[in-house]
């Protein structure tokens, strides 16, 4: 209750802004009239002294509340009312005594001082109110901005949480798809390796069958031709036919042996990769017309049988690709054994592989040919490293295999591949 009364008193003493003209002058007029009425009420107590005491109160109040001019107006109204009704002769504006002149002069001097002090105080209070209002408005705007910022932060936090949840679900789906794809690639790789293993076994069986059946049959034909030649009294006219038949048998026997050796050379099982590679390179050079430099040591410790087979198949596929696609006139075959790995390199001086094709080869095995995919899968199965490089001119195919224990394909990058200059 006391707080409410104090607040109301402060409100009554708060200066009125200059723009409220009518309110200021109304209060000033009312204050002048109130001063006259209050003096009338106090007249029995005050008597013929202190005529203007109530007017001073009104002037001071109006100076603080309404400003200079309204305070002067309030003082003038109070002065005229007091002078007319309370000073002798009453109900007249006539001046009889000099003391009244002195009182009038004193009134105006005191009123001027009160108006000056009250007006100055009012101006200070107005500036202070403006400052307080500006600070209050700034505080409200700042509070509103903080509320908006807090609201925006909450909305952003909610959106971040929602987006994080969506990304988490998408990541889980992606990881699931990656796992499925990786498993599918592993299964496909195992299937590919299994098919190539079956292919090698079938090649070995076909090579053995050609050697044991067709080869023996052709050998028997040659023996029969030799017996026909030994028969006495054979017609002379049949001799050219017998010679042609013998030549055809020799040619067929040579083709069967070549095909059998290409399918699975017995030399690979008997002597190892180095002699088998030299034999294949020499025969391939004769059949294709390519000039092939062969850098294969005469004496080399043999790796395991499966590694020898992989190296030989890479050699076969690489030289076949050189002959079919590169339009090369020369090639180089290099086989080296260094430390704990063995490396084979086949390079040519042909037209090379376009960069786009080379990127597809490095990125996806599914888009590659069967030969390239087969070479890559064979090498990865043994934990090796397979690499195709575009030269200027030509192409280089390199493969490095560990000699001892099998390692995973993920650690194959640890195997070195020797860089050599084009010959």
Image (cartoon, rainbow, N blue to C red):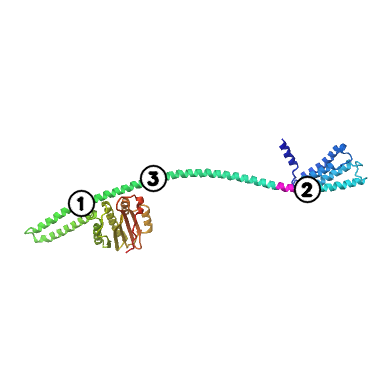
Q: Which residue is mark 1?
A: 208
Which class describes the residues within 10 Å of circle 3: few (<14), some (14-19), or many (20+)? Answer: few
For the residues labelled 2 and 3, say whether their Cβ atoms are less than 8 Å apart.
Answer: no
Left or right: residue 332 compared with residue 30: left
Q: Is residue 251 magenta?
A: no
Which of the labelled discs sits on residue 119, or is there none?
2
Which class describes the residues within 10 Å of circle 2: few (<14), some (14-19), or many (20+)? Answer: many
The residue at the point 43 percent across, 44 percent down is: 172
Q: Nearer the viewer, residue 77 or 244?
A: 77
Q: Alpha-carbon distance for marks 3 and 1?
A: 43 Å
Q: Which residue is most to the top?
A: 1
The residue at the point 10 percent across, 61 percent down is: 237
- The quadrant of the picture occupied by the N terminus is top right
Tell me residue 212's x, y (percent): 18, 51
Q: Earlier in the sequence, mark 2 or mark 3?
A: 2
Left or right: residue 406 compared with residue 231: right
What element does badge 3 sit on?
helix
Would you say residue 149 is visible in this rendering? yes
Would you say residue 366 is visible in this rendering? no
Which of the labelled discs sits on residue 245, or is there none?
none
Q: Is residue 126 magenta?
A: yes
Left or right: residue 26 compared with residue 369: right
Q: Alpha-carbon distance for marks 2 and 1?
A: 127 Å
Tell me residue 224's x, y (percent): 12, 55
Which of the labelled discs sits on residue 179, or is there none?
3
What element does badge 1 sit on?
helix
Q: Quadrant of residue 297?
A: bottom left
- Count of numbered badges drawn on the protein: 3
For the residues labelled 2 and 1, say whether their Cβ atoms are less than 8 Å apart.
Answer: no
- Nearer the camera: disc 2 or disc 1: 2
- Main secondary structure found in the magenta portion: helix
């Amino acid at each position: 209750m006391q707080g409410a009364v104090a607040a109301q008193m402060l409100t009554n003493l708060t200066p009125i802004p200059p723009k409220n003209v009518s309110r200021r002058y109304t209060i000033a007029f009312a204050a002048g009239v109130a001063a006259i009425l209050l003096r009338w009420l106090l007249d029995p107590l005050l008597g013929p002294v202190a005529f203007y005491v109530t007017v001073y109160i009104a002037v001071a109040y109006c100076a603080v509340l309404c400003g200079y001019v309204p305070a002067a107006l309030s003082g003038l109204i109070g002065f005229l009312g007091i002078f007319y009704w309370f000073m002798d002769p009453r109900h007249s504006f006539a001046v009889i005594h000099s003391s009244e002149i002195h009182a009038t002069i004193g009134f105006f001097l005191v009123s001027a001082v009160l108006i000056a002090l009250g007006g100055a105080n009012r101006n200070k209070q107005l500036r202070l109110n403006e400052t307080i209002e500006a600070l209050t408005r700034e505080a409200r705007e700042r509070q509103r901005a903080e509320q908006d910022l807090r609201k925006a932060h909450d909305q952003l936090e909610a959106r971040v949480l929602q987006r994080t949840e969506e990304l988490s679900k998408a990541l889980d789906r992606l990881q699931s798809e990656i796992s499925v794809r990786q498993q599918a690639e592993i299964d496909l790789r195992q299937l590919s390796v299994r098919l190539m293993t079956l292919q090698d076994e079938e090649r070995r069986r076909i090579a053995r069958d050609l050697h044991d059946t067709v080869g023996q049959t052709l050998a028997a034909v040659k023996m029969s031709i030799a017996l026909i030649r030994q028969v006495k009294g054979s017609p002379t006219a049949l001799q050219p036919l017998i010679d042609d038949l013998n030549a055809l048998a020799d040619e067929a026997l040579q083709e069967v042996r070549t095909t059998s050796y290409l399918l699975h050379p017995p030399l690979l099982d008997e002597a190892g990769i180095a002699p088998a590679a030299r034999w294949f390179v020499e025969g391939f050079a004769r059949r294709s017309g390519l000039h092939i430099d062969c850098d294969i040591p005469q004496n080399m410790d043999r790796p395991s049988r499966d590694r020898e087979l992989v190296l030989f198949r890479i050699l076969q596929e690489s030289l076949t690709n050189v002959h079919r696609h590169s339009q090369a006139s020369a090639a180089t075959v290099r086989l080296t054994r260094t430390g704990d790995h063995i490396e084979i390199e086949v390079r040519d001086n042909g037209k090379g592989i376009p960069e786009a094709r080379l990127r597809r080869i490095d990125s996806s095995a599914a888009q590659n040919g069967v030969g390239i995919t087969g070479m890559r899968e064979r090498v990865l199965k043994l934990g090796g490293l397979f690499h195709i490089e575009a030269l200027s001119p030509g192409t280089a195919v390199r493969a490095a295999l560990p000699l001892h224990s099998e390692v995973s394909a993920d650690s194959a990058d640890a195997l070195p591949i020797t860089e050599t200059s084009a010959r």
